[in-house]
Image: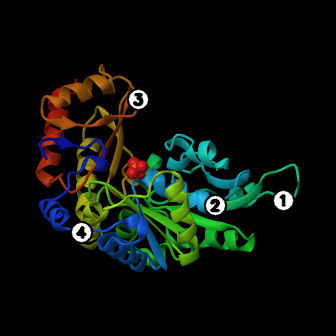
Amino acid sequence: MDRVDLRSDTVTWPTPEMRQAMAEAAVGDDVFGEDPTVNALQEAAARRLGKEAGLFVASGTMGNLVAILAHCGRGDEVILGDKAHTFVYEAGGIAALGGIHPHPVPVQRDGTLPLEMIRAAIRPDNIHMPVTRLIALENTQGTVGGLPLTKEYTDAVGEIARAHGLALHIDGARIFNAATALGCDVADLVAAADSVTFCLSKGLCAPVGSVLVGSHEFIARARRARKIVGGGMRQAGILAAAGLIALEKMTGRLAEDHANARRLAEGLAALPQFEVDLAQVQTNMVFFSLRPEVPITAYELAERLKRHNVWIMCMDERRFRAVTHYWIRPEHIEQTLAAIRQETP
Ligand SMILES: *Cc1c(COP(=O)(O)O)cnc(C)c1O
């Protein structure tokens, strides 16, 4: 990449190997189910996550939308985090397009929704109320710093879901970061879930796409929902070819990104102008803020850093987010810290 871009792991460019595979991909009409590369990606993703079937979708947002459309009907309710991507950052799609009622539960600092609050959010059989159908978790939970939810926690939520006849969906945009941080097998981690989405286009470097996995019967319904939202793509094998490399070659190296995030967080913690909670840095995200007395805004500092070819995201006047990924090497962390040291008054 041509800059040290720490704003997000969505900025990653495809690798040369991906571009090559895309150029040579075998393709067919995927709406007819005839694209061999899409089919290979869907099967590989399902196998990897321990589910029966997969569905290639254009984005993580589309994956969550078609999953929730497949689980819920109009007026049904989904219990999810009040800081969940689906609740905050997906333009209200489940309500706008599905008539699905979100029931937010407060996300804790560790990324969990308290089990007792999930239980309390489940509606009794009462004609005044919406019908609860689904619980949705996010792993890693982005807004609290990319914290991984454990298998034990996920299993406990799965038990609540089963006891009440509900489904469990996991927005696993960064599920491989979670499995890496926890040192566990990704299929084990999501064993309790009926459906899972993960992004190919974040830390895994593919240019486009996510995969939704679940049972054969669920994926058949999700395929129809994908068609409804205009997500039936044709020779999508061009994109899936990069996705296969993302899945097979990029999931095993995420610990490098986590080590770089740690390096950055520790470098920032050593500077008197910044506050960073090292306990919240467990995957590839670092949230940090300017101390109140520092006479510069986050926006001004971010502008100054661009002169050093370093790009960081501002969350507000005082707070930043930096996300490490494939294109960020240890020397870029040093470059970033040097620029921050030089530019922060
Ligand atoms: C990025 C992200 C998504 C959506 O992915 P897009 O491909 O940007 O639509 C969904 N959930 C979480 C937690 C994400 O971080």
Do the residues under discs 2 and 4 have CB atoms within 8 angstroms?
Answer: no
Calculate the distance from the C-alpha at mark 2 to the C-alpha at mark 4.
Answer: 31 Å
Residue ID for mark 4: 245
Amino acid marked by disc 3: Asp
Q: Position of residue 13 (x, y in %)?
A: 20, 51
Which residue lies at the image location 67% right of the left edge and 47% below the top edge?
Answer: 99
Residue ID for mark 2: 135
Q: Is residue 81 above or below residue 180?
A: above
Q: Nearer the viewer, residue 267 or 224?
A: 224
What mark, if any, has residue 96 been given in the picture? Answer: none
Residue ID for mark 3: 316
Q: Position of residue 11 (x, y in %)?
A: 26, 46
**Discs 3/2, front:** 2
What secondary structure is found at the residue carrying circle 1? loop
What secondary structure is found at the residue carrying circle 2? strand
Q: Is residue 328 above or below residue 41?
A: above
How are the residues colored? rainbow
Amino acid marked by disc 1: Pro
Amino acid marked by disc 4: Ile
Residue ID for mark 1: 124
Calculate the distance from the C-alpha at mark 1 to the C-alpha at mark 3.
Answer: 40 Å
Which residue lies at the image location 69% right of the left edge and 69% below the top edge?
Answer: 160
Q: Nearer the viewer, residue 262 or 23?
A: 23
- Which mark is first along the chain, 3 or 1? 1
Circle 4 packing at 10 Å, graded few (<14), some (14-19), many (20+), is many
Is residue 318 something that shows in the picture?
A: yes
Which residue lies at the image location 71% right of the left edge and 52% below the top edge?
Answer: 74
Total labels: the figure holds 4
- Which mark is first along the chain, 2 or 3? 2
